[in-house]
Structures are given as C-alpha cells and as structure tokens.
Amino acid sequence: MGRDESIMVHSLRIKIYQLTLDEKKTGHFLKIQKLLKSERGRHSYQRIVEWLKLADRIPGFKAENRLFARELYQHKPNLPALKDELRKGGLV
C-alpha cells in the first residue's frame, strides 16, 4: 500500500469512527428524552444523571453533553427533582 492509500484508509477510519460517535450521541440524547417523556420521579432522574456522567467520558462529547444537561435543567414543565439530581451529579 502506498503512502496516499495509507492516508486515505486512515482518513476513512476517522470518518467511520466519527459517524459511530455521532450515532451514539444521537441515541444517547434520544434515550434520555424518551425516558423523560414516559417516566417521572427521582429514580428516573438519577438514571438520567448516571447516563450523562457516563457520556462525559466519551472523547469529544463532554461539551455537547453539558449543553444537553443545561437544556434538561431548563425543561418545562419545571422539574425540581430533576434539577436537584443534575446539581448533585455536578452536571450544571
């Protein structure tokens, strides 16, 4: 394999990795939004915070994750227990 082919293969691997990462991000956000629509209660909010904290560990995902956490914090209708759990988890 020549140098140009090697660069193309490396570039393709990066694109595939990025697509996979984007799918994980989208799936992560959708999973949380679905849970928030279908369930209420502190236990559900604690689970959401656990997922957000795990997502913080994905390289290049922390800033988007924190933005999403702030959006959840400002969720309407107002959800005081969710806000409390997000604060306890150090996400806002």
Image (cartoon, rainbow, N blue to C red):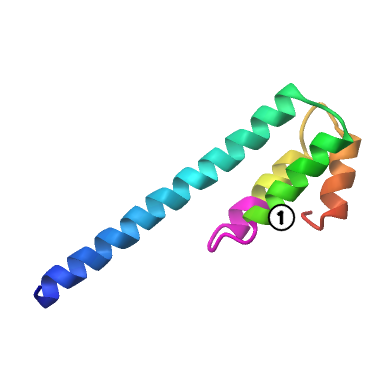
Q: Nearer the viewer, residue 37 or 79?
A: 37
Q: Position of residue 75 (x, y in %)?
A: 76, 34
Look at the image and give the residue range highlighted in magenta. Answer: 56-66
Farthest-out residue, bottom: 3
**Circle 1 sits on which residue?**
53
Among the 4 quarters of the image, the one containing residue 9: bottom left
Was residue 70 drawn as part of the magenta stretch in this picture? no
Residue at 46 percent across and 48 percent down: it is 22
Q: Nearer the viewer, residue 58 or 61?
A: 58
Was residue 62 drawn as part of the magenta stretch in this picture? yes
Farthest-out residue, top: 38
Q: Amino acid at mark 1?
A: Lys
Viewed as shown, does residue 32 lie left or right of 9?
A: right
Disc 1 element: helix
Q: Position of residue 44 (x, y in %)?
A: 80, 35
Q: Answer above or below: position of 69 versus 79.
A: below
Viewed as shown, does residue 24 lie left or right of 76?
A: left
Q: In this figure, what is the number of numbered marks?
A: 1
Among the 4 quarters of the image, the one containing residue 7: bottom left
